[in-house]
Amino acid sequence: MESSAEVLYVELISSEEALKKLLDEVSVEVGSEVVRLLSSVGRHSFRDYVSTVDVPPFSRSAVDGFAAIFADIVGASEGSPALLRVTGSVDVDSVEVPTINRSEAVKVSTGAPLPRGADVVIPIEYCKVLEDRVYVYRSYPRYANISFKGEDLRVGDIIVRRGTKLRPWHVAALKASGYEEVEVFRKVRVSIVSTGSELVKGVLPNYTLPLVASYIAELGGEVALTDVVPDSIEDIATAVEKALELSDVVVVTGGTSVGDRDLSPRALESLGRSKKVFHGVRVRPGRTCGAYVVDGKLVLLVSGLPVATYVSLELFLKPLVYKLYSSKPEPKPTVRGRLTRRLPNEPGFRSFYRAVACIEGDEVLIVPLRLTGSGVLSTLVRGNAVVEVPEDSEGYEEGTEIVATLVNPLVECSSIKLPI
Protein backbone atom coordinates (compact mmCIF):
# COMPACT_ATOMS: atom_id res chain seq x y z
CA MET A 1 0.00 0.00 0.00
CA GLU A 2 3.01 2.27 0.44
CA SER A 3 3.48 2.58 -3.32
CA SER A 4 -0.23 3.41 -3.84
CA ALA A 5 -0.03 6.23 -1.34
CA GLU A 6 3.12 7.50 -3.00
CA VAL A 7 1.45 7.60 -6.42
CA LEU A 8 -1.60 9.42 -5.07
CA TYR A 9 0.38 12.17 -3.41
CA VAL A 10 2.61 12.69 -6.45
CA GLU A 11 -0.56 13.33 -8.48
CA LEU A 12 -2.01 15.96 -6.15
CA ILE A 13 -3.10 19.04 -8.08
CA SER A 14 -4.31 22.46 -6.96
CA SER A 15 -7.99 22.92 -6.21
CA GLU A 16 -8.17 25.62 -8.90
CA GLU A 17 -6.80 23.27 -11.55
CA ALA A 18 -9.08 20.45 -10.35
CA LEU A 19 -12.17 22.69 -10.56
CA LYS A 20 -11.27 23.90 -14.05
CA LYS A 21 -10.89 20.32 -15.27
CA LEU A 22 -14.17 19.32 -13.66
CA LEU A 23 -16.15 22.20 -15.19
CA ASP A 24 -14.61 21.53 -18.61
CA GLU A 25 -15.54 17.84 -18.56
CA VAL A 26 -19.12 17.92 -17.26
CA SER A 27 -21.72 18.33 -20.03
CA VAL A 28 -25.10 18.04 -18.30
CA GLU A 29 -28.10 20.13 -19.38
CA VAL A 30 -30.69 20.28 -16.60
CA GLY A 31 -33.50 21.86 -18.63
CA SER A 32 -36.36 23.98 -17.29
CA GLU A 33 -39.82 23.94 -15.78
CA VAL A 34 -42.54 26.54 -15.29
CA VAL A 35 -43.56 27.38 -11.72
CA ARG A 36 -45.97 29.81 -10.14
CA LEU A 37 -44.33 33.16 -9.50
CA LEU A 38 -44.92 33.05 -5.74
CA SER A 39 -43.16 29.66 -5.61
CA SER A 40 -40.09 30.82 -7.52
CA VAL A 41 -38.01 32.40 -4.74
CA GLY A 42 -34.57 30.78 -4.61
CA ARG A 43 -34.90 29.27 -8.09
CA HIS A 44 -32.78 30.38 -11.07
CA SER A 45 -34.45 32.06 -14.02
CA PHE A 46 -34.13 30.05 -17.22
CA ARG A 47 -34.40 33.11 -19.46
CA ASP A 48 -34.36 36.89 -19.50
CA TYR A 49 -37.56 38.60 -18.37
CA VAL A 50 -38.44 42.17 -19.37
CA SER A 51 -41.09 44.53 -18.13
CA THR A 52 -44.23 44.56 -20.25
CA VAL A 53 -45.64 47.70 -18.62
CA ASP A 54 -44.49 51.00 -17.16
CA VAL A 55 -44.13 50.96 -13.37
CA PRO A 56 -45.74 53.03 -12.01
CA PRO A 57 -48.37 53.08 -14.77
CA PHE A 58 -49.04 56.79 -14.27
CA SER A 59 -47.44 59.74 -12.49
CA ARG A 60 -48.56 59.81 -8.85
CA SER A 61 -48.03 61.50 -5.53
CA ALA A 62 -45.34 60.03 -3.29
CA VAL A 63 -46.83 61.59 -0.13
CA ASP A 64 -50.09 62.68 1.44
CA GLY A 65 -50.39 66.41 0.74
CA PHE A 66 -51.44 69.00 -1.81
CA ALA A 67 -50.54 68.97 -5.49
CA ALA A 68 -49.75 72.44 -6.83
CA ILE A 69 -47.91 74.42 -9.48
CA PHE A 70 -44.28 75.07 -8.57
CA ALA A 71 -44.42 78.75 -9.54
CA ASP A 72 -47.17 79.30 -6.94
CA ILE A 73 -45.20 78.00 -3.92
CA VAL A 74 -41.70 79.40 -4.67
CA GLY A 75 -40.41 81.14 -1.53
CA ALA A 76 -43.16 79.88 0.75
CA SER A 77 -42.11 79.88 4.42
CA GLU A 78 -43.43 79.99 7.98
CA GLY A 79 -43.36 83.75 7.91
CA SER A 80 -44.64 84.12 4.35
CA PRO A 81 -46.91 81.20 3.38
CA ALA A 82 -48.33 80.72 -0.10
CA LEU A 83 -52.15 80.82 -0.23
CA LEU A 84 -53.90 78.50 -2.72
CA ARG A 85 -57.54 77.64 -3.46
CA VAL A 86 -58.45 73.95 -2.93
CA THR A 87 -60.42 72.74 -5.95
CA GLY A 88 -60.80 69.06 -5.13
CA SER A 89 -59.13 65.85 -3.97
CA VAL A 90 -57.74 62.68 -5.55
CA ASP A 91 -57.39 59.29 -3.85
CA VAL A 92 -55.55 56.14 -4.95
CA ASP A 93 -58.72 54.68 -6.46
CA SER A 94 -59.88 57.86 -8.23
CA VAL A 95 -60.82 57.41 -11.87
CA GLU A 96 -61.27 61.07 -12.76
CA VAL A 97 -58.12 63.19 -12.59
CA PRO A 98 -58.70 66.97 -12.29
CA THR A 99 -56.65 69.74 -13.88
CA ILE A 100 -54.89 72.37 -11.79
CA ASN A 101 -54.65 76.05 -12.80
CA ARG A 102 -52.50 78.79 -11.32
CA SER A 103 -53.10 79.52 -7.58
CA GLU A 104 -54.98 76.24 -7.17
CA ALA A 105 -54.25 73.07 -5.20
CA VAL A 106 -55.71 69.56 -5.08
CA LYS A 107 -55.53 67.34 -2.02
CA VAL A 108 -53.81 64.03 -2.88
CA SER A 109 -53.13 60.74 -1.09
CA THR A 110 -49.94 58.72 -1.36
CA GLY A 111 -50.13 56.80 -4.64
CA ALA A 112 -52.96 58.92 -6.04
CA PRO A 113 -52.78 60.00 -9.71
CA LEU A 114 -51.11 63.39 -10.14
CA PRO A 115 -53.57 66.11 -11.26
CA ARG A 116 -52.88 67.47 -14.74
CA GLY A 117 -50.79 70.64 -14.62
CA ALA A 118 -49.31 69.93 -11.16
CA ASP A 119 -45.51 69.75 -10.91
CA VAL A 120 -44.96 69.60 -7.13
CA VAL A 121 -46.58 68.02 -4.07
CA ILE A 122 -46.29 69.63 -0.63
CA PRO A 123 -46.51 67.18 2.32
CA ILE A 124 -49.61 67.75 4.43
CA GLU A 125 -47.57 68.52 7.55
CA TYR A 126 -46.45 71.79 5.93
CA CYS A 127 -49.99 72.85 5.00
CA LYS A 128 -52.90 74.37 6.90
CA VAL A 129 -56.44 74.18 5.49
CA LEU A 130 -59.07 76.81 6.22
CA GLU A 131 -62.36 76.07 4.43
CA ASP A 132 -61.48 76.04 0.69
CA ARG A 133 -58.05 77.62 1.14
CA VAL A 134 -54.71 76.04 2.00
CA TYR A 135 -51.68 77.83 3.42
CA VAL A 136 -48.34 76.34 2.31
CA TYR A 137 -45.52 76.97 4.81
CA ARG A 138 -42.59 75.47 2.94
CA SER A 139 -41.22 75.68 -0.57
CA TYR A 140 -40.17 72.57 -2.51
CA PRO A 141 -38.27 72.20 -5.80
CA ARG A 142 -40.19 71.41 -8.97
CA TYR A 143 -41.18 67.71 -9.24
CA ALA A 144 -40.63 67.12 -5.50
CA ASN A 145 -42.63 64.23 -4.02
CA ILE A 146 -43.80 62.98 -7.42
CA SER A 147 -43.30 59.44 -8.67
CA PHE A 148 -43.34 59.67 -12.45
CA LYS A 149 -44.76 57.12 -14.86
CA GLY A 150 -42.15 54.47 -15.70
CA GLU A 151 -39.48 55.79 -13.33
CA ASP A 152 -39.29 52.38 -11.63
CA LEU A 153 -39.55 50.19 -14.75
CA ARG A 154 -40.23 51.04 -18.36
CA VAL A 155 -41.59 48.71 -21.03
CA GLY A 156 -38.64 46.64 -22.25
CA ASP A 157 -36.46 47.10 -19.14
CA ILE A 158 -34.78 43.86 -18.05
CA ILE A 159 -36.08 42.61 -14.69
CA VAL A 160 -33.97 39.44 -14.44
CA ARG A 161 -31.41 37.82 -16.69
CA ARG A 162 -30.99 34.11 -17.36
CA GLY A 163 -29.34 32.48 -14.37
CA THR A 164 -30.50 35.07 -11.83
CA LYS A 165 -31.34 33.56 -8.46
CA LEU A 166 -34.81 34.94 -7.83
CA ARG A 167 -35.19 37.01 -4.68
CA PRO A 168 -38.30 38.65 -3.19
CA TRP A 169 -37.67 41.93 -5.04
CA HIS A 170 -37.46 40.10 -8.36
CA VAL A 171 -40.79 38.43 -7.63
CA ALA A 172 -42.36 41.81 -6.78
CA ALA A 173 -41.04 43.38 -10.00
CA LEU A 174 -42.23 40.44 -12.10
CA LYS A 175 -45.65 40.64 -10.49
CA ALA A 176 -45.81 44.39 -11.12
CA SER A 177 -45.11 43.64 -14.77
CA GLY A 178 -47.98 41.17 -15.01
CA TYR A 179 -46.17 37.83 -14.76
CA GLU A 180 -47.95 35.03 -12.87
CA GLU A 181 -45.56 32.22 -13.81
CA VAL A 182 -41.84 32.04 -14.48
CA GLU A 183 -39.63 29.55 -16.31
CA VAL A 184 -36.82 28.38 -14.06
CA PHE A 185 -34.03 25.81 -14.25
CA ARG A 186 -35.12 22.40 -13.11
CA LYS A 187 -33.50 21.55 -9.80
CA VAL A 188 -30.20 19.70 -10.21
CA ARG A 189 -30.74 16.11 -9.13
CA VAL A 190 -27.97 14.69 -6.95
CA SER A 191 -27.69 11.13 -5.66
CA ILE A 192 -25.60 10.16 -2.64
CA VAL A 193 -23.86 6.80 -2.28
CA SER A 194 -22.33 6.21 1.16
CA THR A 195 -19.71 3.49 1.29
CA GLY A 196 -18.52 1.54 4.31
CA SER A 197 -19.32 -1.85 5.77
CA GLU A 198 -19.29 -0.23 9.22
CA LEU A 199 -22.22 1.95 8.10
CA VAL A 200 -24.16 -0.98 6.68
CA LYS A 201 -23.71 -2.94 9.91
CA GLY A 202 -24.60 0.07 12.06
CA VAL A 203 -21.26 0.01 13.86
CA LEU A 204 -20.91 3.75 13.22
CA PRO A 205 -23.61 6.36 12.61
CA ASN A 206 -23.75 7.82 9.10
CA TYR A 207 -23.85 11.55 9.76
CA THR A 208 -22.06 12.50 6.56
CA LEU A 209 -25.02 11.47 4.38
CA PRO A 210 -27.50 13.91 6.02
CA LEU A 211 -24.84 16.62 5.84
CA VAL A 212 -24.52 16.11 2.07
CA ALA A 213 -28.30 15.85 1.56
CA SER A 214 -28.93 19.06 3.50
CA TYR A 215 -26.14 20.83 1.65
CA ILE A 216 -27.72 19.89 -1.68
CA ALA A 217 -31.10 21.20 -0.56
CA GLU A 218 -29.59 24.49 0.62
CA LEU A 219 -27.78 24.75 -2.71
CA GLY A 220 -31.07 24.62 -4.59
CA GLY A 221 -30.80 21.01 -5.77
CA GLU A 222 -32.78 17.94 -4.84
CA VAL A 223 -31.71 14.51 -3.65
CA ALA A 224 -32.73 11.88 -6.18
CA LEU A 225 -31.45 8.79 -4.35
CA THR A 226 -29.53 7.81 -1.21
CA ASP A 227 -27.84 4.47 -0.82
CA VAL A 228 -25.49 2.87 1.71
CA VAL A 229 -23.27 0.08 0.44
CA PRO A 230 -20.50 -2.11 1.90
CA ASP A 231 -16.83 -1.97 0.98
CA SER A 232 -17.19 -3.87 -2.27
CA ILE A 233 -16.12 -2.75 -5.73
CA GLU A 234 -19.11 -4.49 -7.29
CA ASP A 235 -21.64 -3.03 -4.81
CA ILE A 236 -20.26 0.50 -5.16
CA ALA A 237 -20.24 0.27 -8.97
CA THR A 238 -23.81 -1.06 -9.04
CA ALA A 239 -25.02 1.71 -6.74
CA VAL A 240 -23.30 4.38 -8.85
CA GLU A 241 -24.84 2.97 -12.05
CA LYS A 242 -28.32 3.13 -10.52
CA ALA A 243 -27.68 6.65 -9.22
CA LEU A 244 -26.51 7.84 -12.64
CA GLU A 245 -29.83 6.78 -14.16
CA LEU A 246 -31.75 9.01 -11.74
CA SER A 247 -29.54 12.05 -11.34
CA ASP A 248 -27.33 14.71 -12.88
CA VAL A 249 -24.56 14.37 -10.28
CA VAL A 250 -23.52 11.55 -7.96
CA VAL A 251 -21.65 12.11 -4.70
CA VAL A 252 -19.85 9.08 -3.27
CA THR A 253 -18.77 9.42 0.36
CA GLY A 254 -15.96 7.34 1.81
CA GLY A 255 -13.41 4.98 0.30
CA THR A 256 -11.47 7.67 -1.56
CA SER A 257 -8.03 7.27 0.03
CA VAL A 258 -5.41 4.57 -0.59
CA GLY A 259 -6.14 1.98 2.10
CA ASP A 260 -7.19 -1.61 1.58
CA ARG A 261 -10.89 -0.66 1.95
CA ASP A 262 -10.71 2.51 -0.13
CA LEU A 263 -12.43 1.10 -3.18
CA SER A 264 -14.44 3.98 -4.65
CA PRO A 265 -11.87 4.95 -7.35
CA ARG A 266 -11.50 1.30 -8.38
CA ALA A 267 -15.28 0.93 -8.56
CA LEU A 268 -15.48 3.91 -10.92
CA GLU A 269 -12.67 2.54 -13.04
CA SER A 270 -14.57 -0.76 -13.32
CA LEU A 271 -17.47 0.96 -15.11
CA GLY A 272 -15.39 1.02 -18.28
CA ARG A 273 -16.81 4.23 -19.74
CA SER A 274 -15.75 6.46 -16.83
CA LYS A 275 -13.07 9.13 -17.23
CA LYS A 276 -10.93 10.19 -14.29
CA VAL A 277 -10.77 13.97 -14.01
CA PHE A 278 -8.56 14.05 -10.91
CA HIS A 279 -7.89 12.16 -7.70
CA GLY A 280 -6.09 14.07 -4.99
CA VAL A 281 -5.98 17.83 -4.43
CA ARG A 282 -3.64 20.07 -2.48
CA VAL A 283 -6.33 20.94 0.06
CA ARG A 284 -6.60 20.31 3.80
CA PRO A 285 -8.94 18.80 4.80
CA GLY A 286 -10.15 16.87 1.77
CA ARG A 287 -7.00 16.06 -0.18
CA THR A 288 -8.26 12.59 -1.20
CA CYS A 289 -11.21 14.08 -3.08
CA GLY A 290 -11.62 12.78 -6.63
CA ALA A 291 -13.82 13.25 -9.66
CA TYR A 292 -14.88 11.04 -12.55
CA VAL A 293 -17.17 11.81 -15.48
CA VAL A 294 -19.57 9.15 -16.74
CA ASP A 295 -21.76 9.95 -19.76
CA GLY A 296 -21.08 13.65 -19.17
CA LYS A 297 -22.21 13.43 -15.54
CA LEU A 298 -19.99 14.11 -12.53
CA VAL A 299 -19.29 11.46 -9.93
CA LEU A 300 -17.63 13.30 -7.06
CA LEU A 301 -15.67 11.16 -4.59
CA VAL A 302 -15.39 12.77 -1.15
CA SER A 303 -14.18 11.71 2.25
CA GLY A 304 -16.52 9.97 4.64
CA LEU A 305 -15.50 12.50 7.30
CA PRO A 306 -17.85 15.50 7.58
CA VAL A 307 -15.41 18.43 7.71
CA ALA A 308 -13.42 17.18 4.71
CA THR A 309 -16.69 16.46 2.90
CA TYR A 310 -17.96 19.99 3.53
CA VAL A 311 -14.77 21.53 2.12
CA SER A 312 -14.99 19.34 -1.01
CA LEU A 313 -18.63 20.27 -1.57
CA GLU A 314 -17.81 23.96 -1.26
CA LEU A 315 -14.87 23.73 -3.64
CA PHE A 316 -16.35 21.48 -6.32
CA LEU A 317 -20.08 20.75 -6.05
CA LYS A 318 -21.25 24.31 -5.44
CA PRO A 319 -19.46 25.89 -8.46
CA LEU A 320 -20.71 23.07 -10.71
CA VAL A 321 -24.34 23.42 -9.62
CA TYR A 322 -24.24 27.17 -10.15
CA LYS A 323 -22.69 26.65 -13.59
CA LEU A 324 -25.55 24.29 -14.48
CA TYR A 325 -27.89 27.13 -13.46
CA SER A 326 -25.93 29.60 -15.67
CA SER A 327 -25.10 31.47 -12.49
CA LYS A 328 -22.29 32.04 -9.99
CA PRO A 329 -22.15 31.43 -6.22
CA GLU A 330 -23.06 34.45 -4.13
CA PRO A 331 -20.11 36.03 -2.30
CA LYS A 332 -20.02 35.46 1.43
CA PRO A 333 -19.36 38.31 3.90
CA THR A 334 -15.90 38.61 5.38
CA VAL A 335 -14.54 40.12 8.58
CA ARG A 336 -11.06 41.28 9.59
CA GLY A 337 -9.86 40.35 13.06
CA ARG A 338 -6.91 39.41 15.27
CA LEU A 339 -5.89 35.75 15.37
CA THR A 340 -5.81 34.34 18.92
CA ARG A 341 -3.46 31.44 18.19
CA ARG A 342 -0.99 30.37 15.54
CA LEU A 343 -2.39 28.70 12.42
CA PRO A 344 0.25 26.44 10.84
CA ASN A 345 0.14 25.31 7.22
CA GLU A 346 2.04 22.78 5.17
CA PRO A 347 3.41 24.73 2.19
CA GLY A 348 1.87 23.55 -1.05
CA PHE A 349 -1.54 22.94 0.54
CA ARG A 350 -4.55 25.26 0.58
CA SER A 351 -5.90 24.85 4.11
CA PHE A 352 -9.30 25.68 5.59
CA TYR A 353 -9.76 26.14 9.33
CA ARG A 354 -13.06 26.50 11.17
CA ALA A 355 -13.08 29.37 13.63
CA VAL A 356 -15.24 31.56 15.82
CA ALA A 357 -15.25 35.27 14.93
CA CYS A 358 -16.32 37.27 17.98
CA ILE A 359 -16.47 40.86 19.19
CA GLU A 360 -14.56 41.94 22.30
CA GLY A 361 -14.97 45.63 22.98
CA ASP A 362 -14.14 47.39 19.72
CA GLU A 363 -12.04 44.50 18.41
CA VAL A 364 -12.84 41.37 16.42
CA LEU A 365 -11.06 38.19 17.49
CA ILE A 366 -10.64 35.14 15.23
CA VAL A 367 -10.51 32.06 17.46
CA PRO A 368 -9.49 28.87 15.60
CA LEU A 369 -11.27 25.69 16.60
CA ARG A 370 -9.57 22.30 16.62
CA LEU A 371 -6.76 22.41 14.04
CA THR A 372 -6.87 18.72 13.11
CA GLY A 373 -9.58 16.12 12.69
CA SER A 374 -11.68 15.96 9.53
CA GLY A 375 -14.28 13.96 11.39
CA VAL A 376 -14.88 16.43 14.20
CA LEU A 377 -18.45 17.44 13.41
CA SER A 378 -18.64 19.87 16.34
CA THR A 379 -16.28 22.30 14.57
CA LEU A 380 -18.92 22.77 11.87
CA VAL A 381 -21.59 23.39 14.50
CA ARG A 382 -19.62 25.70 16.79
CA GLY A 383 -17.81 27.73 14.16
CA ASN A 384 -19.20 30.83 12.45
CA ALA A 385 -16.20 31.54 10.24
CA VAL A 386 -13.67 29.89 7.94
CA VAL A 387 -10.03 30.93 7.65
CA GLU A 388 -8.26 30.05 4.41
CA VAL A 389 -4.48 29.74 4.32
CA PRO A 390 -3.10 29.82 0.75
CA GLU A 391 -0.72 27.23 -0.69
CA ASP A 392 2.32 29.53 -0.63
CA SER A 393 2.01 30.31 3.10
CA GLU A 394 3.43 28.52 6.14
CA GLY A 395 0.52 29.83 8.19
CA TYR A 396 -0.32 32.85 10.34
CA GLU A 397 1.24 33.78 13.66
CA GLU A 398 -0.81 34.57 16.76
CA GLY A 399 -1.85 38.21 16.82
CA THR A 400 -1.84 38.58 13.04
CA GLU A 401 -4.67 40.59 11.46
CA ILE A 402 -6.39 38.22 9.04
CA VAL A 403 -9.59 38.02 7.01
CA ALA A 404 -12.14 35.29 7.73
CA THR A 405 -15.24 34.33 5.75
CA LEU A 406 -18.42 34.42 7.80
CA VAL A 407 -20.89 31.55 7.53
CA ASN A 408 -22.96 32.77 10.47
CA PRO A 409 -23.28 36.14 12.28
CA LEU A 410 -20.60 37.52 14.60
CA VAL A 411 -21.03 36.70 18.28
CA GLU A 412 -19.88 38.33 21.52
CA CYS A 413 -16.65 36.80 22.82
CA SER A 414 -18.26 36.68 26.28
CA SER A 415 -20.75 34.12 24.90
CA ILE A 416 -18.03 31.58 24.13
CA LYS A 417 -15.52 29.85 26.31
CA LEU A 418 -11.98 31.08 25.57
CA PRO A 419 -9.69 29.48 24.66
CA ILE A 420 -11.74 27.04 22.63
Image (cartoon, grey):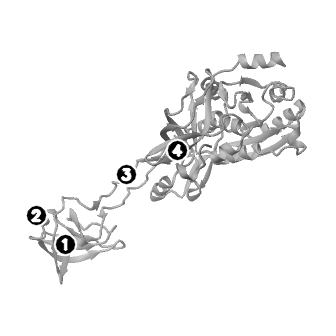
Residue that numbered label 4 is attached to: 164
Tag nearer the camera, 4 or 3: 4
- Is disc 3 surrounded by few (<14), some (14 to 19) or many (20+) residues within 10 Å? some
The quadrant in which the C terminus is found is top right
Q: Is residue 392 above or below residue 138?
A: above
Distance (Cα) linking label 4 and label 3 = 20 Å
Q: Earlier in the sequence, mark 4 or mark 3?
A: 3
Disc number for residue 415:
none
Disc number for residue 75:
2
Residue that numbered label 1 is attached to: 105
Tag nearer the camera, 4 or 2: 2
Please provide percent x and percent y for residue 197.
Answer: 89, 38
Q: Tell me the SS state at disc 1.
A: strand
Q: Is residue 84 above or below residue 295?
A: below
Q: Can see residue 51?
A: yes
Q: Earlier in the sequence, mark 3 or mark 1?
A: 1
Q: Amino acid at mark 4?
A: Thr
The quadrant in which the N terminus is found is top right
Disc number for residue 154:
3
Residue 74 occupies which quadrant of the picture?
bottom left
Of all residues, the one furthest to the left in this rendering is 80
Q: Is residue 207 above or below residue 240?
A: below
